[in-house]
Amino acid sequence: MHDGKEREVRVSISGVEIAVERRGKGSPLLLLYGEEALELEAPAIEELAQRYELIIPSPPGFGTSERPDWITSPDDIAYLYLDLAERLRLNKVAVLAFSFGGWIAAEMATKDCSFIAKLVLVSPYGIKVGGPFDRDIQDIWLLHPDKVMGLKWFDKAKGRRDYASMPDDKLSIIARNNESFARFAWEPYMHNPKLKHRLARIKAPTLLVWGENDGIVTTDYGRAYQALIPGSRLAVIAEAGHYPHIEQPEAFMRQVRGFLG
């Protein structure tokens, strides 16, 4: 068992160096963070680290993980992460995944659910639920940053980040994460056209968590996602946007604890 101290290791999968953070002590829990990596500093995640050993890989191009040219989509990352789970001997573990990480986790679960005990998807992207000209997911690269902030957060004050006081190395990581997210999610925009037809393959018990005021992917999108995963459940958290685990951590943790047991 891991000693509980936070540490980062590097694992080579298919020739790709992946940074993997291990945090906490207890049964393993695979945590896939979102495009902004806000989960790495969220109090709710620190609470989870009191009960679980969190296994937190950085996707290719995020953090300090390598990004080879041949990895071009969340589908590719999913296969890489499945190999990582096998390498780390993860078996019947809980998986908790946020936003872009939720998309990756959904892709993984449609390919191989055997290592997943329970799956929690928080505001995931990944599917197209409307017609070709319907805006299922807001275009975060087209809109003004202030508009995007208002769509993401119920309380915008909780989403503000003090970039001026951040060290250069952290700013470089943020810029690298943003660039890689755009590369993986730009075309087709924020979805894999095949994923919604594969979600029925997910056999693990699944909980989806949504902020009631999410303006990036609305609760209608969440209900459509939930309807495609057999036996899944959707929990909607009031007074929260795209990051319910940050805006309403207590309500979020009640849902997660109740589901994971």
Image (cartoon, rainbow, N blue to C red):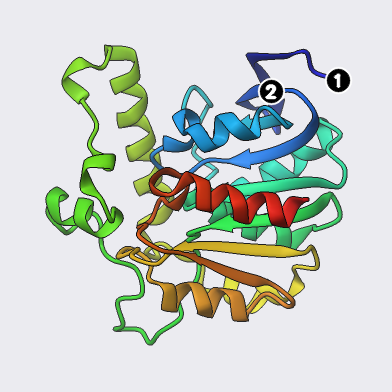
Q: Who is closer to the viewer here, 2 or 135?
A: 2
Q: Position of residue 142 (x, y in %)?
A: 17, 58
Name the residue that disc number 1 marks. 1
| Residue at the (67%, 28%) spot, across then down | 15
203 vs 168, left or right, is right
> Which corner quadrant of the image does residue 10 belong to?
top right
- Whether 9 is drawn above or below 237: the answer is above
| Residue at the (46%, 80%) spot, across then down | 129
* Disc 2 secondary structure class: strand
Q: Who is closer to the viewer here, 240 or 202?
A: 240
State the quadrant of the N terminus: top right
> Which corner quadrant of the image does residue 13 belong to?
top right
Distance, label 1 to label 2, CA atoms, is: 10 Å
* Residue 24, disc: 2
The kind of residue on which mark 2 rests is Gly
Q: Who is closer to the viewer here, 256 or 198?
A: 256
